[in-house]
Amino acid sequence: MKDTGTISVPNTPNQAFIERLEHVYGVEPSMAERLLEDFLIFFNQTVEEWVRSRHYHLQRQGYKNEDIYRIIAQEIENRRFTSEPLTIRQIRRLIYG
């Protein structure tokens, strides 16, 4: 006997990931889409975007610039960027131009 049931095939890799989030974490489709969007934004940032964003968030937490530059220099080594480690001067120039 032939199986005539339909199989749901994801249209895109993003859709497949959304369906995985729904299945594994039990979230609604709209929440899975928002999570994917946040992941993509986070992991698609350039070095410059990440440095500026991190600087802003650390400032909001009350850190002084000299401390922020050191924190960013340490953290950037653990990010997925393929750039060389940045000096304090390079970080400052990314933020202020």
Image: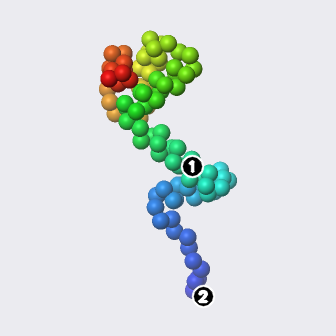
Q: Position of residue 69 (x, y in %)?
A: 43, 17
- Which residue is tagged 2? 1
User: Residue, x 32% and y 30% (percent of image)?
Assistant: 83
Residue 34's label in the rendered image is 1
- When the figure is inspected, residue 40 is found, relative to residue 81, above or below; the finding is below
- Count of marks overlaid on the render: 2
Kind of residue indicated by mark 2: Met
Comparing 72 with 64, the one in front is 64
Q: Is residue 58 visible?
A: yes
Q: Is residue 74 visible?
A: no
Residue 2's label in the rendered image is none
> Which quarter of the figure is the N terminus placed in?
bottom right
> Which quarter of the figure is the C terminus placed in?
top left
Comparing 25 with 42, the one in front is 42
Q: Which comes sooner in the sequence, label 1 or label 2?
A: 2
Q: Is residue 28 left or right of residue 7?
A: right
Of the residues tagged 1 and 2, which is closer to the observer? 1
How far is the residue under mark 1 from the one under mark 2? 42 Å
Q: Position of residue 45 (x, y in %)?
A: 41, 38
Comparing 81 with 68, the one in front is 68
Comparing 61 with 82, the one in front is 61
Kind of residue indicated by mark 1: Arg
Instruction: Report helix, strand or loop for mark 1.
Output: helix
